[in-house]
Amino acid sequence: MASIQARGGGRAGIVGINVTPMVDVVLVLLVIMMVSATYIVSQSIKVELPKTATSDDAAPSVAAVTLTKDHQTLFNDAPVDEGQLVAKIKEAVGANADVSLVVSADQDVSHGVVMHVIDLAKIEGVVKFAINVERSK
């Protein structure tokens, strides 16, 4: 313990404050805040945005591929085969090089089929992907 001997042989009070425990507590709180902030940001609330005639930024282009459990492939809700899918993806990339591909697959569709669709899109130049999921309750 940090104490100073007084002239009379008794102990004087502590004159210095040890800030190490306080720094430890502040760092732990900072880490907790950083972890919880990333979790809060990853949650989203679905809202219906107001519509305007003008806008500052162009909306990002999104292409949607749906894979059903009965082996049917849909591109933007229209049935396609693999050749048509490649052509549609190529057309979407041609219209906007920054297109994002959202893949929605039934839970019974194999992982290999989903990866094959993503691979086809990568070959055509798509670099942004999202896998559509439903939150369990």
Image (cartoon, rainbow, N blue to C red):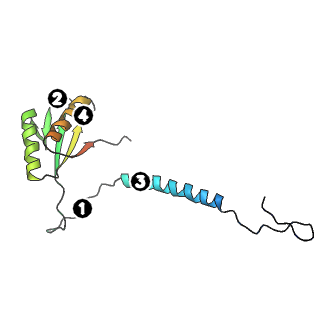
Kind of residue at disc 4:
Asp
Judging by the rendered image, the residue that carries numbered circle 1 is: 49
Label 1, secondary structure: give it: loop
Give the image quarter of residue 47: bottom left
119 vs 41, left or right, is left
Q: Do callouts 1 and 2 mark residues in contact (Cβ within 8 Å)?
A: no
Work out whether mark 1 precedes mark 2 in sequence or the reverse, and give the earlier one.
1
Work out whether mark 4 precedes mark 2 in sequence or the reverse, and give the earlier one.
2
Residue 41 in percent (x, y) is at 38, 55
Kind of residue at disc 2:
His
Quarter of the figure that contains the C terminus = top left
Label 2, secondary structure: give it: loop
Judging by the rendered image, the residue that carries numbered circle 3 is: 38
Kind of residue at disc 3:
Thr
Kind of residue at disc 1:
Leu
Relative to 2, does residue 75 appear above or below in the rendering?
Answer: above
Residue 35 in percent (x, y) is at 46, 52
Q: CA distance from mark 3 to mark 4?
A: 28 Å
Work out whether mark 3 precedes mark 4 in sequence or the reverse, and give the earlier one.
3
Query: Which residue shows up at 52% across the image and 58% down it?
Result: 30
* Near-viewer residue (33 or 49): 33
Q: CA distance from mark 1 to mark 3?
A: 24 Å
Label 4, secondary structure: give it: loop
Q: Can residue 81 be seen from the camera position used here?
A: no
Work out whether mark 4 precedes mark 1 in sequence or the reverse, and give the earlier one.
1
Judging by the rendered image, the residue that carries numbered circle 2 is: 71
Q: Do callouts 1 and 3 mark residues in contact (Cβ within 8 Å)?
A: no
